[in-house]
Amino acid sequence: MSKIVFFLEEPSAEQMLKGVLPKILPQTIIPRFVVFEGKQDLEKHLPMRLRAWQNPDALFVVMRDQDSGDCTAIKRGLVKKCTDSGKPDTLVRIACRELESFYLGDLKSVSQAIGSANIENHQNKAKFRNPDTLASPSQELKKLAPSYQKVSGSRVIGPMLDLDNNKSTSFNALINGVRRLIEGA
């Protein structure tokens, strides 16, 4: 049985993945989550955690928010940390701006999960057609669903996300990357 280890910036990403991964992982691959206390903690401790991992069959994924940084530079830096730590096959994915862009890419699921009527009607508005370009996806989500909280919201939205019909390019890159990673295992 193989393990897929996710190195994450925050608990809300873990909750989202716990809802999404059962849809794509075979039962022979067990997910494990290493949650850091923010992006600085992830950047600082990731190399040591990767080097210390002893299971040779483990697959690794690093996921971090872009926030206001340069996506390409962030990814390049994380890939270098992984390679320098002896894990060059680590999948690195950046949530464009914030994790909430994943949710804004599938407003139907948000509506179903949180129970806010008519949220999905906003999906065809220009600003939600490509949620990865929004400056603050978390603020936009709070406007649409005032009851949304990061961890509990991620816990209920994650299982509802439609893996094949999401407007977030960075969400689709994550899902497709994990699928390719496990196919190669």
Image: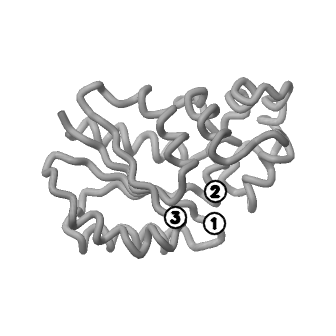
Q: Which residue appears at 76% of the width and 44% of the height?
A: 128
Q: Earlier in the sequence, mark 1 or mark 3?
A: 3
Count the labels in the image.
3
Q: Position of residue 38 (x, y in %)?
A: 54, 65
For marks 1 and 3, give the one nearer the viewer: 3
Quarter of the image where one finds residue 134 = bottom right
Name the residue type under label 3.
Glu
Helix, strand or loop at mark 1: loop
For the point 42% across and 40% down, the residue is 176
Q: Which mark is residue 39?
A: none
Q: Nearer the viewer, residue 173 or 15?
A: 15
Q: Residues within 10 Å of mark 2 (few under 14, many from 20)?
A: many
Q: Quadrant of the C terminus?
A: top left
SS type, badge 2: loop
Does the residue at mark 2 contact the one at mark 1 (Cβ under 8 Å)? yes
Q: Which residue is mark 2?
A: 98
- Looking at the image, tell me whether mark 2 or mark 1 is earlier in sequence order: 1
| Residue 5 point in image, percent of width and height | 32, 48
Left or right position of 50 against 176? left
